[in-house]
Image (cartoon, rainbow, N blue to C red):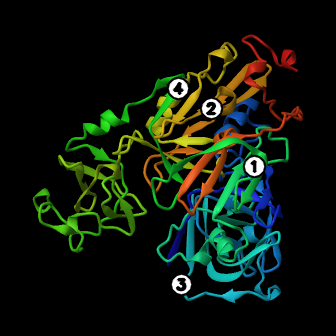
Amino acid sequence: MAICYLFRFLLLVSATTKAALAIVVPLHLHERSPLKGNSFLAVSSRSQSRLEYYRARHNNTHAIEYSGDIKVGNQTFSMIFDTGSDQLILPGLDCVSDACKKHRVYDPKKSRTATNLSTNDARQCQFGAGSVMGYEREDQVCFGDACASAEFVEALIESDDPFLTAHFDGVLGLSLALRKNATVKSSVLEALVASKAIPSAVFSVFMAKDLHSDVSELSFGEPNAARMTGDITWVPLSEPGYWQFSLSSIRVGGKQLSACGAEMANLTGGMKVVSFSGMSTQGHGSPVCCSGTDELDYEDRCQFWGNATDTDDDGTERIRSRFADAGVIQQVSTDGRVAIKFKDGCLQNVPRKWVSLDDGCRGDGTIQALLDTGSSLMMAPTQLSQKILSALGVQENCTTQDPETFPSLTLTLPTGKELTLTPADYMDTVVENDGVYCWPHLIPMPITAKGPALVLGMPFLRTYYTTFDAENKRVGFATPKQPPLTAAKTHRDTARSVNLRAFRPGDTEAQLR
């Protein structure tokens, strides 16, 4: 059974054609209503306090969705565009799940361009909040007038969470290829380029800071100059597959959180490595398995096996995997390689930069970051998130804290370029009758398939106009042109978000109106 890996849920859109060379896709925001009992966000205002409700609401990483339409086989579907997966998924006409019955389903009989690619093997797609099982098909996919023939999974079974109550019908992946058997038609982005519907495999994300506005958008084929100002700062991807890049440091209020370079320089035997960006080992009987460090000097099978290429700083091409595994360091060589013993007893000698510790430090002294257009928050491994939150020093009841003292959060790229989030960028603020409550948009998360990483979701994407360049394997950041903020509509059941600069210790909700 083939598996397509989904990192998480992301962007939902409806497409219109901007010009012959680019497609501008308006984004429409929805707040998700999760299933009761299947999500910790499912709380009742009758049984829980407003504070408990908004605390749970804040901590739900899928509370916000951006929805819109595409056409497949001349049938319209509301989709999410997921930068963490690499394939289109639609509910099928024969789907037996309740989730499919509440959404538009794909009917090949209504299409003149449908092709059945199915074999007897079903595709099982796993992601953070659920799963899909179905069979492969090919049909015409259109964003407005831009069309291409692309492959997708026609779902026969969908999990209730998150599909049952979702505003979208399906998922469209925008990552680089994550599967060994991926083709040009597996990626809608690549298929659009191959059909010359767009000039290059590039898309850009603009998210308005005013959540009540309707100007957020995705631009395919090239960045939209009308949504950014100044030059784009580019950084190369550090891992195959996901939109992942390196940070040289993280600073809070100007103070560096951890010295990863020094920590990784002092690697010693016995240290646990929580992820290894090389091959998942295959047991003692495998031709790629070595059992002891005495074999490292003469056994090629202990060196650099995997399914994707990478180049070291000296230009040497190595082989590495798209997935990660954990192990324990057995030996650190003077040439910069690290011998790791895995759970199955196999040993491999790998470049230092392929290993990561559970505090987020990677062997090359960097901290890894992932761009996630579908996450309402930012997330990080437990140790790293605790460091950041402790340094921010924001109390949940922040009534007595002066917002002027909240520090900035700065991410430094290897080039020295700084990406800074102010308190207004990373903070969620709610005013209640008994005071002001603050929640930084950061929560702990499990280690990803590529090891420990800082996941940059919507708070970051509202701060920086972000461009994803699949052709050159890089991401770029620019200053967005944000429209003026408008007054948020309020009602008795909705918390009132306020600008951090708008209140002072001791202010009441009435004084802030």
Q: Secondary structure at mark 3?
A: loop
Q: Is residue 99 above or below residue 341?
A: below
Name the residue nearer the viewer: 98 or 175: 175
**Labelled disc at residue 225:** 1
Residue at position x 77%, y 24% in the image: 431
**Sequence-wise first label, 1 or 2:** 1
Crowding near the residue tagged with mark 2, few <14, some 14–19, many ≥20 C-alpha atoms within 10 Å: many
Considering every residue shown, the one lying at the far left of the view is 294
Report the amino acid beneath label 2: Leu
Residue underneath mark 3: 121
In the rendered image, residue 55, in percent from the top left (x then y), is placed at 67, 34
Q: CA distance from mark 4 to mark 1?
A: 31 Å
Labels 1 & 2 near each other (Cβ < 8 A):
no
**Sequence-wise first label, 4 or 2:** 4
Residue underneath mark 2: 421
Kindly report which numbered mark, 3 or 4, lies closer to the viewer in this rendering.
4
Crowding near the residue tagged with mark 3, few <14, some 14–19, many ≥20 C-alpha atoms within 10 Å: few
Residue at position x 56%, y 24% in the image: 392
Residue at position x 50%, y 62% in the image: 241
Q: Secondary structure at mark 2?
A: strand
**Sequence-wise first label, 4 or 1:** 1
Q: CA distance from mark 1 to mark 2?
A: 22 Å
Report the amino acid beneath label 1: Ala
Q: CA distance from mark 2 to mark 3?
A: 47 Å
Residue underneath mark 4: 252
In the rendered image, residue 448, in percent from the top left (x then y), is placed at 48, 52
